[in-house]
């Protein structure tokens, strides 16, 4: 690896991990995806166009790999036995308000169509410009702007929606 390559790639790793986790919603799968992305970027570094932003190029690789994995996983269901389940997956979520709000946000993000979620994450979380996001997603800038606008509107609607009706507790009476 050249010094230039290391200098350009190393600072991107946390952002790549965030984006991968947001897309796949699984920490281990996201880490594997980032590893595959970095291997591909390093092995094909010589194929990169010099006039093309390295950050956008690497995010493009990650995005394409993620979409391939999501399509494959949609075709075959995953079976996990109870003996293989991690105990942390069975634990009760925190009851703090921040934790609940975070969970609501993740649930709302999950309800967005993939093309809107990808644009929203690239532009707002990873701070890519519209042009960079357009290159990553291989769509026109106008499409990025349109998807981002629709994603923000829908996310705002989902986050401001009234919580689901709670189940009322039955009337209890004391017996003497």
Image (cartoon, rainbow, N blue to C red):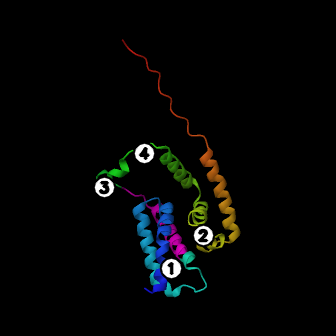
Q: Which mark is residue 128?
A: 2
49 drawn magenta? no
Q: CA distance from mark 2 to mark 3?
A: 38 Å
Which residue extends farthest left? 83
Frontmost of labels 3 and 1 is 1
Q: CA distance from mark 1 to mark 4?
A: 38 Å
Local secondary structure at mark 1: helix
Q: Position of residue 101 (x, y in %)?
A: 52, 47
Q: CA distance from mark 4 to mark 2?
A: 32 Å
Task: Give the mark nearer the N terminus: 3 vs 1.
Answer: 1
Asked if disc 1 and disc 2 are in contact, CB closer than 8 Å, the reply is no
- On screen, residue 173 versus residue 60, left or right, reads left
Q: Position of residue 40 (x, y in %)?
A: 46, 79
Q: Which mark is residue 8?
A: 1
Task: Give the mark nearer the N terminus: 4 vs 2.
Answer: 4
Task: Give the mark nearer the N terminus: 1 vs 4.
Answer: 1
Find residue 84 and report its image quarter. Answer: bottom left
Which residue extends farthest right? 142
Q: Which mark is residue 84?
A: 3
Q: Give the camera-side residue of 51 and 64.
A: 51
Q: Give the camera-side residue of 84 and 86.
A: 86
Q: Position of residue 45 (x, y in %)?
A: 49, 84
Q: Would you call the spot at circle 3 few (<14 residues within 10 Å), some (14-19), or many (20 or more)?
A: few
Dot 4 corresponds to which residue?
Answer: 94
Above or below: residue 149 compared with residue 46: above
Find residue 54 and report its image quarter. Answer: bottom right
Magenta residue span:
58-79
Which residue extends farthest top? 176
> In the rendered picture of this protein, how many numbered marks are placed on residues?
4
């Amino acid at each position: 690896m050249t010094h230039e390559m290391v200098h350009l790639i190393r600072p991107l790793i946390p952002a790549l991990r965030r984006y991968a986790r947001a897309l796949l919603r699984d920490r281990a799968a996201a880490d594997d995806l980032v590893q595959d992305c970095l291997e591909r970027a390093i092995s094909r570094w010589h194929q990169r166009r010099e006039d093309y932003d390295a950050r956008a190029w690497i995010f493009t690789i990650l995005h394409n790999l993620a979409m391939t994995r999501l399509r494959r996983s949609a075709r075959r269901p995953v079976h996990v036995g109870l003996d293989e389940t991690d105990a942390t997956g069975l634990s009760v979520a925190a009851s703090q308000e921040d934790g609940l709000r975070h969970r609501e946000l993740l649930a709302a993000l999950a309800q967005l169509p993939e093309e809107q979620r990808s644009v929203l994450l690239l532009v707002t979380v990873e701070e890519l410009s519209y042009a960079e996001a357009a290159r990553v997603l291989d769509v026109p800038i106008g499409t990025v702007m349109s998807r981002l606008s629709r994603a923000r509107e829908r996310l705002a609607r989902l986050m401001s929606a009234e919580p689901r009706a709670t189940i009322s507790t039955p009337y209890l009476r004391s017996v003497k």
